[in-house]
């Protein structure tokens, strides 16, 4: 009988440990909700990035355009330096160079060009502009896209873990079975970019579906058809350590629309301010 109090204490202690471990297991449950919550929190904390972007984008002729670029990104003040595979360099910040992108084409006429980042020269057959670099634009699109799904548990799926380019990743798929194009009447002053951003959809998809020559080829009162969501299927590989995407793949009713692979990704590295100036050593502006 003398050992009964000790036994009771032991049982109580074991119960506390069991409850504690159970609570810990509950918080460690991995599903689409917890993965996306972690993703959005991580994206909000991204201040700088360096990465190689390997991408494939469907053009207006139905063929896929593939290319790579090296990117340095800073969230605030917004800065992007980009070097394309063929050697062209781009430097841009909304408050720099009167808002125009500084471009060294690495080809004839071998002089620096000042180009409208939203204009036809820079945006022709380009799904996204330089202002969509980093993850802020994508994060906003994804958050709004997830809000549009009618049945989260059956449309936003955690498909397990996957190894990708040396990263251990969560595999997430957002499925929109009712993906379609809906009519919208353009308002005064709107172009396709403004319309697409209003509904968190891809401006190039809008341009392509409506057979328009440019993002500005729309007038007030004109009816255009916009996708009901960003894509019919959106696939994400989310790297576990930093909780950021290393692959984004979008499909529409015809199949692959765009795919982006983030290689050699560094999150929040120290990037000196001079690396976002045209005089930085190694640049050719």
Image (spheres, rainbow, N blue to C red):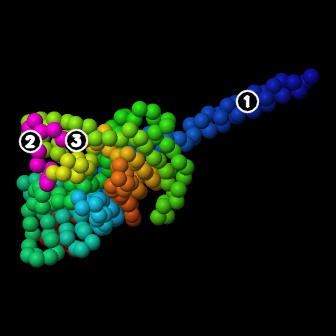
Query: Dot 1 corresponds to which residue?
Result: 15
Residue 29 visible: yes
| Marks 1, 3: nearer the viewer | 3
Residue 52 appears at what percent x and percent y?
A: 34, 65
**Residue 56, picture quadrant:** bottom left
Residue 274 appears at what percent x and percent y?
A: 20, 63
Mark 2 / mark 1, whichever is N-terminal? 1
Does the magenta portion include 214?
Answer: yes
CA gap between label 3 and label 2 equals 14 Å
> In screen coordinates, is 256 left or right of 172?
left
**Residue 264, picture quadrant:** bottom left
Does the magenta portion include 253?
Answer: no
Q: What residue is shown at x 41% (from left), y 32% (from top)? A: 150
Q: What residue is shown at x 32% (from left), y 44% (from top)? A: 230
Residue 31 appears at what percent x and percent y?
A: 53, 41
Query: Dot 3 corresponds to which residue?
Result: 225
Q: Quadrant of the N terminus?
A: top right
Query: Dot 2 corresponds to which residue?
Result: 219
Q: Which residues are magenta?
A: 213-224
CA gap between label 2 and label 1 equals 69 Å
- Label 1 sits on a secondary structure element that is helix
Give whichever of 131, 198 is nearer the camera. Answer: 198
Residue 12 appears at what percent x and percent y?
A: 75, 27
| Marks 2, 1: nearer the viewer | 2
Is the residue marked by circle 2 packed among few (<14), some (14-19), or many (20+) residues within 10 Å?
Answer: some
> Could you tell me how many numbered marks the image carries?
3
Give whichever of 250, 107 is nearer the camera. Answer: 250
């Amino acid at each position: 009988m003398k050992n009964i109090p000790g036994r009771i204490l032991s049982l109580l202690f074991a119960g506390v440990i069991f409850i504690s471990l159970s609570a810990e297991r509950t918080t460690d449950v991995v599903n689409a909700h917890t993965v996306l919550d972690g993703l959005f929190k991580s994206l909000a904390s991204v201040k700088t990035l360096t990465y190689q972007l390997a991408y494939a984008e469907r053009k207006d002729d139905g063929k896929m355009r593939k290319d790579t670029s090296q990117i340095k990104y800073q969230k605030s003040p917004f800065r992007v330096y980009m070097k394309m595979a063929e050697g062209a360099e781009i430097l841009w910040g909304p408050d720099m160079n009167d808002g125009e992108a500084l471009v060294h084409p690495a080809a004839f006429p071998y002089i620096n060009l000042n180009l409208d980042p939203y204009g036809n020269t820079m945006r022709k057959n380009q799904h996204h502009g330089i202002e969509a670099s980093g993850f802020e634009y994508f994060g906003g699109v994804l958050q709004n896209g997830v809000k549009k799904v009618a049945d989260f548990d059956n449309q936003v799926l955690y498909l397990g873990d996957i190894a990708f380019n040396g990263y251990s990743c969560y595999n997430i798929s957002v499925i929109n079975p009712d993906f379609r194009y809906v009519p919208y009447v353009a308002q005064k002053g709107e172009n396709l970019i403004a319309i697409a951003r209003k509904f968190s959809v891809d401006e190039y998809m809008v341009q392509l579906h409506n057979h328009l020559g440019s993002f500005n080829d729309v007038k007030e009162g004109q009816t255009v058809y916009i996708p009901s969501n960003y894509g019919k299927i959106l696939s994400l590989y989310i790297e576990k350590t930093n909780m950021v995407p290393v692959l984004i793949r979008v499909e529409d009713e015809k199949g692959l629309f765009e795919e982006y692979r983030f290689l050699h990704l560094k999150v929040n590295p120290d990037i000196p301010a001079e690396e976002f100036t045209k005089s930085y050593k190694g640049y050719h502006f």
